[in-house]
Image (spheres, helix red, strand yellow):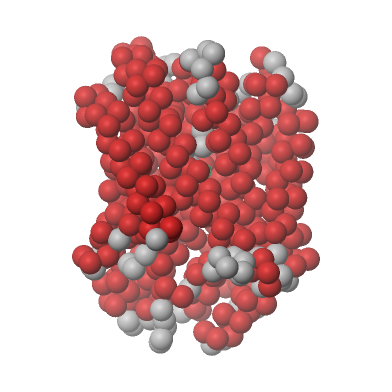
Amino acid sequence: MVTERGAWGSRAGFILAAAGSAVGLGNIWGFPTQVGQGGGAAFVVVYLACVALICAPIMIAEIAIGRRAQKDPVTAFRVIRPGSAWWLTGLLGVMAGVGILSFYSVIAGWTIAYVWFTATGAVSGSQEAIGGFFGSFVGNAPLTIGLTVLVLGVTAGIILGGVRGGIERATTVLMPALLILLIVLAIRAATLPGADAGLAYYLRPDLSRLWDIRVFNAALGQAFFSLSLGMGAMITYGSYLSRREVIGVAAMWVVALDTSVALLAGFIIFPAGFSIAGFDPATGGVGLIFTVLPRLFATLPGGELFGAAFFILLTMAALTSTISLLEVPVAHLIDGHGWSRRSAVLAITALTAVLAIPSALANGAVAGLSSIPGLGMGFLDLMATVWNNFALPVGGLLIALFVGHVWRLDQALEELRAEGAWFPAPRLWGVLIRYVCPAAILLIIFFTIRDLAG
Ligand code: PHE
């Protein structure tokens, strides 16, 4: 069994892998989509508050649990509190890993196809033509299912390589390249005619939306999803971290990188979107980046190259996230049930592929899945809502309660300050994790359910 567990090669290795998990479709596809549906800048304000006050403290808590226990999320709770039922928190995370991966791999499949489509100039022409192209592509059942299986297969292949050789190596080069390209695109977008309206939409909050509970629920779910929190991904990655590393610093880096990439994505999409006549960010839906960005690339010299580079990097960013999604259930079968890495990877990948099929068919291929009667949303949206807006915050709530009131702060702080490590504001962190995080998450979930029921 010892040989099946891995370890990071360096501190940068952990930060990059954790940031690789965090930075993904959630930032570049999810964030602008949610901003568009949540009414613009008001969503951004609420999102940033969720990141700072709720998610950053939980990020620290997850890494601490993982490093203390050196186990997968289910076994970690068993190690720290033997005989209690807290391991169910880990089990919820394992299920969320499979659930999220099942729809995430569908969208990652789209990004692969768009490498090809942009490079060959297949997506071009008027806005209607680009939108129509997207619609008929995602409605193509064999193609989208094939791409989904491809994403899962590549993810499984990387994970078979283990922690250091597979996960760490892949991330080290990709993250800097992605950041540079995003900055270039944001600068170009800001100079387009009409960009001002996009920037105003993105940066000037409509204060009346600030107290909309749906905006809060969507922002909280998006923050958990984007930071890979609430399902034990950071517990798992923390379990491969050495005692010599400083958790506080690593967590700050991951939060800062992830938030910067999400904000940058907005600085690209909204100015570019508003430069198109008649653009409405709220109706872009899941296709927003696939229909707006090709127009942006068309304004650049060598746009096909830019487009292809963008979608290559986005695919890579998605893969470093799918890796962490798959690693959680895989680590559980290895640590908790003594499976070999190989059988664990094969079994979970096969299960996820089956679960992914309805999400792949929910974008036009099968009408009953694309818009589920009585629900007003399709299967993919339903999965995203259930896992992101409910399962992850509930997981985060349980993690905060566990660390703040069961494992207890002095124990957690002992882990955070192991070997003299620097940890800023332990009191503040304690108050946030014990009271603020649980209370805020509970209130948001309570009012959301009340709002849905009424
Ligand atoms: N954070 C990833 C993204 O933004 C998605 C993810 C969620 C990965 C949960 C792992 C766990 O794309």
Quarter assignment of residue 161:
top right
Q: Position of residue 101 (x, y in %)?
A: 62, 47
Q: Is residue 120 visible?
A: no
Residue at the image point whose x is 32% and y is 67% from the top: 40
Q: How many marks?
A: 0
User: In the drawing, does residue 376 fall left or right of residue 406?
Assistant: right
Does any portion of residue 65 appear in the rendered image?
yes
Q: Position of residue 62 (x, y in %)?
A: 44, 29
- Horizontal side of 209 relative to 34 (left or right) equals left
| Image side of residue 2 versus residue 340, left or right | left
Q: Residue at x 55, y 61 (%)?
A: 381
Q: Is residue 376 above or below residue 66?
A: below
* Quadrant (top left, top right, bottom left, bottom right) of the N terminus: top right
Identify the image quadrant of the C terminus.
Answer: bottom left
Task: Judge by depth and name the residue closer to the eye, 96 or 101.
Answer: 96
In the rendered image, the vertical position of residue 94 relative to residue 242, given as above or below? below
Q: Position of residue 285 (x, y in %)?
A: 50, 70
